[in-house]
Image (cartoon, grey):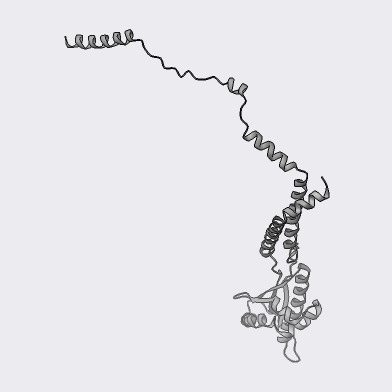
Amino acid sequence: MRWTDVRAALRSARWVLVVVVLVGALGGLLLDLHLDRSAVSSTAQLTVSDASGAPANSDSAQTMTSYITNQMPTYAALATSDNVLAPAANGSGTTVALLRQEVTATAVSDSTVLDLDVRAATPEAASSEANAVVQSLSGAITRLETPAGQQSRVVVTTSTPPTTPAARFVPPMGALTVAGAVVGALLVLLGAVAWATTLPQRGWRRFSAWLFRRPSDAELARIPAPDIRERRDDPEQALAKVAGHWLKKLRGRD
């Protein structure tokens, strides 16, 4: 096999090369589009409680709990305000506009619990931004509930710290498309090399010769031939059979 043979095989298969490369690239593109590239999430929970220290069954404590429960939607809306996001963005190395798209705060119904969800491209970024938002939101709620010259009416605690999402590897967009095209080109190259060695041609000729091989005379002679001669009775035996048949009928009538 020479390099000229490989080049000749490639020239002969240039349209096959184009088709296989396109098919490989299309397959890689489909995989690229179906991979999950959604942002990962870090979740946390904040609990807002009465800061007076009154017994839980006292009227003042129940009134304060009812007040906090009614204020929870306000605290949830505060999570995406500039007062909260600006310090959090500075602390996590992002911008307010991007962070506002990534933060979701939900007040748990009939409770004093606030659910936070912060999305980011990587687990580390999601956890870092969630911690910054939790700290900033806790301070903003405390300031909101602190009358001038007095202490805060509420205490904000982190009941569930921000979680760290599981790490995952997702190749960049377009990487699988390029990989599919390269694999297709390699397959055609390997096919051209094999064709230049004449191995496929020789293998096909041997297979065709075996498949359509005609048996030799010696093999045909070993096959037993069926005896196609019919056995026939001679005329005397035939007449004897007919006579016997009619005699049986006559005796049956008697």
User: Could you say where residue 221 lies in the image, as x and y percent from the top left?
Assistant: 58, 20
Total tally of numbered discs in the picture = 0
From the viewer's side, name the closer residue of 18 and 77.
18
Q: Residue furthest bottom?
A: 148
178 vs 95: above or below: above
The residue sitting at 74% across, 76% down in the picture is 134
175 vs 140: above or below: above
Q: Which quarter of the rendered picture does the N terminus lie within?
A: top right
Instruction: Quadrant for residue 137, please give it.
Output: bottom right
From the viewer's side, name the closer residue of 64 and 128.
128
Instruction: Quadrant for residue 164, please give it.
Output: bottom right
Whether residue 68 is visible, yes or no, is no
User: Could you say where residue 143 lies in the image, as x and y percent from the top left?
Assistant: 74, 86
Q: In the picture provided, is 253 more to the left or to the right than 106?
A: left
Instruction: Quadrant for residue 172, please give it.
Output: bottom right
From the viewer's side, name the closer residue of 130 and 176.
176
User: Could you say where residue 101 lies in the image, as x and y percent from the top left?
Assistant: 69, 78
Q: Which quarter of the rendered picture does the C terminus lie within?
A: top left
Q: Residue furthest left?
A: 254
The residue sitting at 20% across, 8% down in the picture is 251
User: Could you say where residue 178 lies in the image, as x and y percent from the top left?
Assistant: 75, 62
The residue sitting at 68% across, 40% down in the picture is 204
Whether residue 103 is visible, yes or no, is yes
